[in-house]
Image: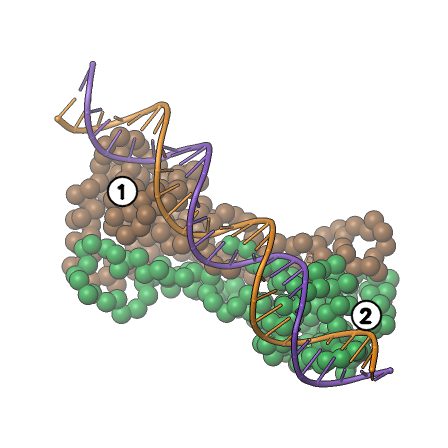
Chain colours: A green, B brown, C purple, D orange
Amino acid sequence: MILKSQVEWVLHCCAILAGLPDGRYLSTKALAELHGLPKEYLSKALQSLSQAGLVHSTLGPSGGYRLARPPAELTFLDIAEAVEGKARTFVCANIRANNPCRPKGYCDSSPCAVARIMWEADEAWRQKLRSVTLADLGEILSQETPPAIWNDTFEWVLKRAG
Amino acid sequence: MILKSQVEWVLHCCAILAGLPDGRYLSTKALAELHGLPKEYLSKALQSLSQAGLVHSTLGPSGGYRLARPPAELTFLDIAEAVEGKARTFVCANIRANNPCRPKGYCDSSPCAVARIMWEADEAWRQKLRSVTLADLGEILSQETPPAIWNDTFEWVLKRAG
DNA sequence: AAATTTAGGGATATTTTATATCCATAATAT
DNA sequence: ATATTATGGATATAAAATATCCCTAAATTT
Ligand code: SF4
Ligand code: SF4
């Protein structure tokens, strides 16, 4: 069970978008080039963000994406779910229904303990991701990244931002 | 990102094994029949449990599996990891290394904030599963399952246990 | 001693998901 | 007008999950 690589991609892209000045847009092309990713496929991931309402897009030259909300209001969970979907990782195939000792037509009123416990673990994962915002990430990255690289990167980005 | 269905299978199987009297074994055939599962493929899942040291097996007629430890010492995490593997769900492809603004040969000392946060979420999932044992599960199931079904099931199981 | 039953492991096939590319379209900027 | 962009559909490829088959060695039953 491994997350799509698109999750990493869009997290990095959002971190960049979070540093963009108000009103500026950054294109798929620039984001793909900056991260060394296949442009067409990254585009699908960014479209997922757009469909989830996390980013706003605009067309034409100087077009691209910007965040739809302030970085403090965008969580890791928002972003991960946009790409990965909101489905739980444990899907219950209801195999207890196959138990030959069950009366025919017996219908279980609710999911059993196995499913509930697995879903609680899923929720713990979600809760952690819900507790971290893009603003938090930006703060950490700006502290940890060597200033030279950090500045060069945003200079590079601004040169390409529409 | 969805867990293998084998995870559900082995959790149910372990719940049954946990109710087995000391020294008795239950075969793959019986476990597959009880849950309505493909015997050969379930066998692979049970072999994973065996390789992880969670169950003990014995050959021949009246052979099969029993738990290797008391139910209170077997956690959901033990069981899930035996089948699903211990790898983290977020794998870092180190795409920041592709950043054209980085000096050539620059080597990042440690994983960045994105990876660390995602790994913390993984750990929250693990922590929840680590906190629930087969003994806990057995207690809940025995309370929630209608007594008639519960008793019939273990009668059925004991008739087939070696 | 022979026949039966079992776990274990290897090989292989099928189905589903993830990854990736290509193209047509409409909107926007210059 | 021309160039550039997001979007969505179609399709192709690679990888993983699901599943079956068969052989072996060990243990039990007869
Ligand atoms: S016992 Fe629980 S996990 Fe298993 S099939 Fe039923 S509801 Fe799903
Ligand atoms: S920035 Fe973090 S998540 Fe992204 S590639 Fe680097 S270490 Fe991995």
| Ligand 2 position by quadrant | bottom right
Give whichever of B141, B135 is nearer the camera. Answer: B141
Image x and y of residue B126, in percent: 50, 55
Residue where numbered disc 2 is placed = A157
Q: Amino acid at mark 1?
A: Lys
Q: How many marks?
A: 2
Secondary structure at badge 2 equals: helix
In the figure, A67 relative to A4: above or below? below
- Can you tell me whether the CB of the residue at mark 2 lies under 8 Å from the nearest atom of ligand 2? no
Q: Chain of mark 2?
A: A
**Which label was assigned to residue A78?**
none
Residue where numbered disc 1 is placed = B29
Q: Amino acid at mark 2?
A: Val
- Quarter of the image with the C terminus of chain B in it: top left
Query: In the picture, residue B130 is in which quadrant?
Result: bottom left
Image x and y of residue B26, in percent: 26, 41
In the figure, B145 relative to B9: above or below? below
Query: In the picture, residue A65 is in which quadrant?
Result: bottom right
